[in-house]
Amino acid sequence: MTTPVCTSASNAAAPAAQTLPYPSFSSYMRARQPALLRTARSLTGNPSDAEDLLQTALTKTYVAWERIEDHRALDGYVRRALLNTRTSQWRKRKVDEFACDELPEPDPVPGGDDPAEQQALRDAMWRAVMRLPARQRAMVVLRYYEDLSEVQTAEVLGVSVGTVKSAVSRALGKLREDSELGLVRS
């Protein structure tokens, strides 16, 4: 067997002997789309962005379909198109952060307190409410935790409005004098 010396003779013989693994772009796309989508997801980290990236790369591949000589290397061509497209997107991204000499102060938390301190105060308040006598505790919970009016609280407990007012007043006085709440507030 002899090796052809003339490159034109070898090129002329190659198309007749070569069988294309994918006769058309659509057959290639249907066969390889799941694997290429996994590659795109690994580049973007977001399924929606990966689909957009793959669509762009497949569009570039479709435009160049006739120029691609070796259809056995299509995956490499598309992967390179994916990588180049992703790199271009990354370079064109809008940068919202700029370097500066001083770091900006974070926005203050509403109320001015640390969330951990707020939680500690809520816990201390609930423990203090639990130390109230049952009747006063029920009235405080209905009035301030359930946000019922004095009339609604009286109806729920079956007492007069004056009883609710006086019991809640005494309960609030006990809560103001509670030593644990004084430590948390200061």
Image (cartoon, rainbow, N blue to C red):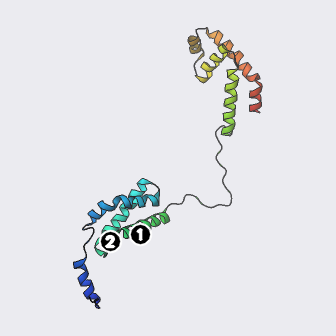
Residue 27, numbered circle? none
Q: Which quarter of the image is occupied by the N terminus?
A: bottom left
Residue at 38 percent of width and 57 percent of height: 51
Q: Nearer the viewer, residue 110 or 121?
A: 121
Density class for disc 2 (Cα within 10 Å; few <14, some 14-19, many ≥20) is few
Check disc 2 and report its element: helix, strand or loop.
helix
Question: For the residues marked 2 and 1, what is the alpha-carbon distance in whole angstroms?
Answer: 14 Å
**To which quarter of the image does residue 62 belong?**
bottom left
Residue 30 lies, in percent from the top left, at 29, 60
Against 55, residue 157 (above or below) is above
Against 172, residue 76 (above or below) is below
Check disc 1 and report its element: helix, strand or loop.
helix
Residue at 54 percent of width and 60 percent of height: 95
Residue topped by disc 1: 80
Say left or right for 90 vs 170: left
Against 10, residue 166 (above or below) is above
Residue at 69 percent of width and 37 percent of height: 117
Residue at 47 percent of width and 66 percent of height: 87
Residue topped by disc 2: 72
Q: Nearer the viewer, residue 15 or 66?
A: 15
Say left or right for 141 vs 179: left
Q: Amino acid at mark 2?
A: Arg
Against 174, residue 85 (above or below) is below
Residue 185 lies, in percent from the top left, at 74, 32
Q: Which quarter of the image is occupied by the C terminus?
A: top right
Which is in the foreground here, disc 2 or disc 1? Answer: 2
**To which quarter of the image does residue 163 belong?**
top right
Q: Amino acid at mark 1?
A: Arg
Q: Residue furthest left?
A: 16
Q: Sequence-wise, which precedes: disc 2 or disc 1? A: 2
**To which quarter of the image does residue 11 belong?**
bottom left
